[in-house]
Image (tube, rainbow, N blue to C red):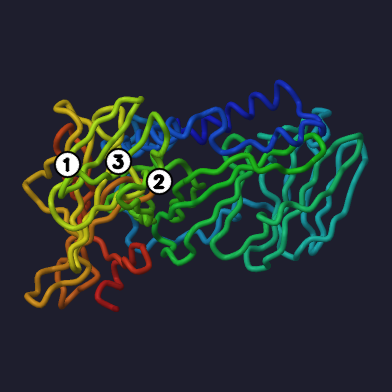
Amino acid sequence: MSNLMEERLRDALAARADQVTPEDLGPLVVPAAAGRSRRTAVLAGLAAAAVVAAVVGVPLLGQDPGAPEPGPADPSPSPTPSVVEQGRAEVRTDLDGDGEDDRAWVEGGTLRVEVSSGTSVEVPVVAGARILPPVTDAGTRNPMLVAVPPAASGGRGTTVTYRAGGLVVDDAPESLALAPGRTVWVDDIGALLVGDFDVDVPENQRVLVEATTYRAVRNGNLVEHGAGHLCWDRVTNALPVPCEQLPAQDADPSLMFPVVEQRSAVGESHAIFDGEYENAVLERRGDGYALVFTWDGMQSQAAVPGGGTPELLGGAIGSSLEAPALVVAQESGDITMMTVFAPTSRGFRALDVEDGRLLVDRPSADEGAVPAQRVWMSQQSGLWSAQQVSPEEEPDLYRVTRWTVDDTVLVADDQGFACLDFTAGRRLPDETCGAS
């Protein structure tokens, strides 16, 4: 189970056991990594990425493990335009907690809500607004209804709760104003989430979603409670889920991108590991350089191979041991050599690369028609490389490799062929290869 899901389940149980009062509003603004150190969060993310890399196919939650394997995907799927498709024109749920279903429905430009006691309310909404499934993962005693406008309208949502003996209407946060690249949904434990994604990713591809969870407090306010990365398979009409819950897919764009842009120069601590007990920094050693790595307060170091001035990439890779693997980049002219360092059974060292391959980032084919090769760190899932197949005929077509750590060796996991645009940082539809 993902850490984001674990946190929401834990928070939901706590909310039901001890209802929040208005006086508690301040402390309820909980950071995304509440109760966990940054190191714990990083390791959890690396562990999840390692699971995705190692498993051939991970079933979705609720799927019968004995069911037959699905057949090949439809080559021309009909993508789902928005998660808001789960919204309905009418919802029935027990809003006031009396054990009887109450009714909420949209009629023209009006949201109407009636509870069994006879209380009702009418609220102007944007024409075409839809009501999401009831939000039950909340700090309120009763469910919350959220009506969202059409994605193209740019309008804000409306919330309705039953409290103090009546129906109360509030404007939803501005983040519930739908726009291109933003979606909103209620997940399978009744939590309200808002997600931002790259709107230019083709709709028949998975996309990485930066999700924010909201929960309600007793006075009806929605409070931002945390954020994390989810993956969204829009073709299957599914909700965004933790990436490791999706079946494995070769050259999965939601795992390959976005690219890690952060780099630390010599003498600067790593973007993630910069504390007293977990730290990584490049230092000068005579005429060369060394990577000094501290984990659990124990310091190790390894010499950096000769070449250009090194920089430490901001991401990390799951290794065979508890500690992460790190990547050093050295530019020389128009190429960049990548070296991976990790704690191993033989100490902290630079890893050997399977089959003696060179991890060289060469953005363009040279005059001798040597194909381009790209090497990059993904924010979501470690180290990748892509070898250009035909510089002249199909310059956007690459053979993709995902790299994983096996003790002292960096192992290649072939991901097949994909059409990639590195300027935009995304996978292109296969039929567009060579079009640029």
**How many labels sit on residues?**
3
- The Cα–Cα distance between marks 1 and 3, rounded to whole angstroms, is 19 Å
For the C terminus, give its image quadrant. Answer: bottom left
245 up-or-down from 384: above or below: above
Horizontal arrangement in the rendering, residue 291 relative to residue 314 (left or right): left
Residue that badge 3 annotates: 317
Q: Residues within 10 Å of mark 2 (few under 14, many from 20)?
A: some
Most foreground residue, 307 or 195: 307
Q: Label 2 sits on what residue type?
A: Ala
Residue that badge 2 annotates: 271
SS for dot 3: loop
SS for dot 1: strand
Checking the image for residue 303, the label placed there is 1
237 up-or-down from 426: above or below: above
Q: Label 1 sits on what residue type?
A: Ala
**Residue 302: x %, y % from top left:** 19, 38
- The Cα–Cα distance between marks 3 and 2, rounded to whole angstroms, is 14 Å
Most foreground residue, 118 or 213: 213
Q: Residues within 10 Å of mark 1 (few under 14, many from 20)?
A: some
Q: Are marks 2 and 1 in contact (CB under 8 Å)?
A: no
Residue 69 makes an appearance in the image? no
Labels 2, 1: front one: 1
